[in-house]
Amino acid sequence: MFRIMKKSLATGVVTGQYPAAKSPTEPVSREAIEKAKPFRRSLTIREVDTGSCNACEMEMNALANPVYDVERFGVHIAASPRHTDALVVTGPVTVNMERALKDVYKQTPDPRLVIALGDCAINCGVFKGSYAVTGPVERHIPVDVRIPGCPPRPAEILAVLDRLRGAHTETDE
Amino acid sequence: MNDGSAAVERIRGAFALAITDIGSVHGVPMLRLLKQDVPAVARYIHTDPHVRGSLSLLWAVDHRPREARYELCYLFTLADRKDWLLLSVDLTGGEREFASITPVVHAAKWYEREIRDLFGLIPVGHPDMRRLVRHEHWPKGSHPLKKEFDWDQVLGRVQGEYAFRKIHGDGVFEIPVGPIHAGIIEPGHFRFSVAGEPILQLEVRHFWKHRGVEKLFEQQRLTEAVPLAERVSGDTSVGHGLAYCQAVETLLGVTVPPRARYLRSLFLELERLHNHIGDVGAICNDTAYVVAHAHCGRLKEQLMQLNDRLTGSRFLRGVNTVGGVSMDLSGVQLSQVDAELQAIEREFAGIEKILFANASLTERLENTGVLSEHIAWDHAVMGVVGRASGIDRDLRRDRPFAAYHECPPKMAVYRYGDVRARMRVRLDEVHDSIRLIRALHRQLPMGLLITQSVEVPTPGQWAISAVEGWRGEIIYVVMAGAEGRIHRCKVRDPSFVHWPAIQWAALGNIVPDFPLINKSFNLSYAGNDL
Ligand code: SF4
């Protein structure tokens, strides 16, 4: 017990210790911010991997570590699409995942946002054209927000989520 | 006397009539066999006490249009000195059937199903002829790795249902999980058959993420496919990139400069480090021990940020290139690495103490998800999972690549095969990786980073390369096509071997322990599904 407390005290607060993100190359559209309004300070996210290389997943997971601590912004990761405000989709959509993606989308209650995370989700990346890929995501379900990168850094994902929550409303775009 | 050539002599003695030719591929002995004799020879290699080969890879090649034949190749790792041995057999004249070795060598099971799906060749005698890669909605006759199959064609969709293995009995019921899971995890399907709490059977149904990676390689040039290799399994970008580069370098006859070899080892260890530390945290998290998870997550993040500062990529992407490495590390950067690792090691040692002082944690880990040495051996398990089950294998020691000849690893081998052993291996390897990085830094030679080559290999030439990634053995087979293109690239992530094994490790455990067992294996879905 004392060891644990000592360790925690010695470590101090690490949250926020990361290099600032460069400003997103793809602006968050006014419509998307408008659509996110009802969620305001709490956005519940469900992550769906439709064939990523898993680096995008790792960066999503990193958002939950103490350094980024995404929960402090009211962002939660939900275990079921039925509890979800926003779907985050990674990877090109594979032939084998197409059905599952559409099912998840159907099960997500309206209003819902779809965020395409990573180059693969946006344009299939290096997997473009393959017989086994039917993506990108927007071919199957409407996409509201795009976060490019291969993979995008956690700070970059955070910056976009920030904008989506209206933290920098109106002034930029 | 147990080296490759001695084994070849023994096999020749026992099967003189089965062998049509003995050759070698870049120093690896290769026996060409008559088709009908493969199972007997494979069985002999697997079971003979003087040979004891474990099947490391089984792959097929469509040689058309150059030659009208399919070839099947079997790569064995011999138990004692870890030499390699190749078997090969041809299918000519429109033949589509070959004799399955699965009944005698379990490790062949998924490989043969994969070959059936991707090439349309039929493993006669295979006990499980269900589809593997091609899910049921794929139209009949679509075999992507046949040369006449267009890489960018649009597949049709048909009706069909996968038949899970059923267990019957009073009170037996099934729990389907996936393909989409509750956490941020890759897609895969697990079907548990349980009676009460204990798992009677687990069936893994994967390949949801099949992206056609091997076919995509065939559209690329030998010298330009590294980015694709780095995206086979993103968490192993260095391992896959390096394995690919090495295979092509062997083909081109390129010798990588010493400084590049050292840097390659250094990057590979950095990759091992952040993954192992992340895994230790994730295992703790699945026992609800959140403090340790938070600390490990923080250290992992620190390492990823270090990677980013050093190379511009948190996953160390782009460091490997055919012929060497594409970036150098300055003296200042290397001292930063040293300083940062020293801090991380101190912290990690502190966390370790906390871990093992906690009975409620260790209780969960001990005797959970046991993979016995026997089953591990039968399924050709290696890497972290193997070393936790008494399989003393590590390519860094057994077939040194990059700079591991000069800086060999210390082995961490445990016997119990449970979650705790798999965590132990990782803990030990974290310390050893840090030691290795220091040693590599100390001995880092000056010089060039890259050897250029203008060579274009003759079509049909091929090479194998293997790298001990943080999960285990990553194997690439690359065959040259016309004009510097790739004719065939076989990719094997260790996950492909370990997924069938996890089905055994789960038996008899309670369902709530499965996430923990799964974490302790931490396999790649992307690397498995390709
Ligand atoms: S965008 Fe890049 S990192 Fe993300 S899944 Fe695709 S290849 Fe992987």
Image (cartoon, rainbow, N blue to C red):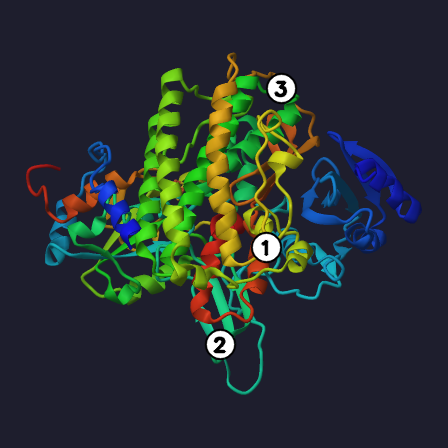
Q: In which quarter of the image is residue B315?
A: top left
Q: Mark 3 points at which residue?
A: B255
Q: Name the residue under label 1.
A: B142
Give the residue drawn at x 40%, y 47%.
B352
Q: What chain does mark 2 sit on? A: B
Amino acid type, residue under disc 2 in the picture: Glu
Q: How far apart are marks 2 and 3 (CA)?
A: 54 Å
In the image: residue B85, left or right of residue B314: right
Q: How far apart are marks 1 and 3 (CA)?
A: 40 Å
Which residue is nearer to you in this view: B484 or B183?
B183
Amino acid type, residue under disc 1 in the picture: Ser
Amino acid type, residue under disc 3 in the picture: Thr
Residue under disc 2 on the same chain as residue under disc 3:
yes
Tag 3 secondary structure: loop
Tag 1 secondary structure: loop
Q: What chain does mark 1 sit on? A: B
Q: Name the residue under label 2.
A: B174
In the image: residue B107, left or right of residue B351: right
**Dot 1, crowdedness within 10 Å: few (<14), some or many (≥20)?**
some
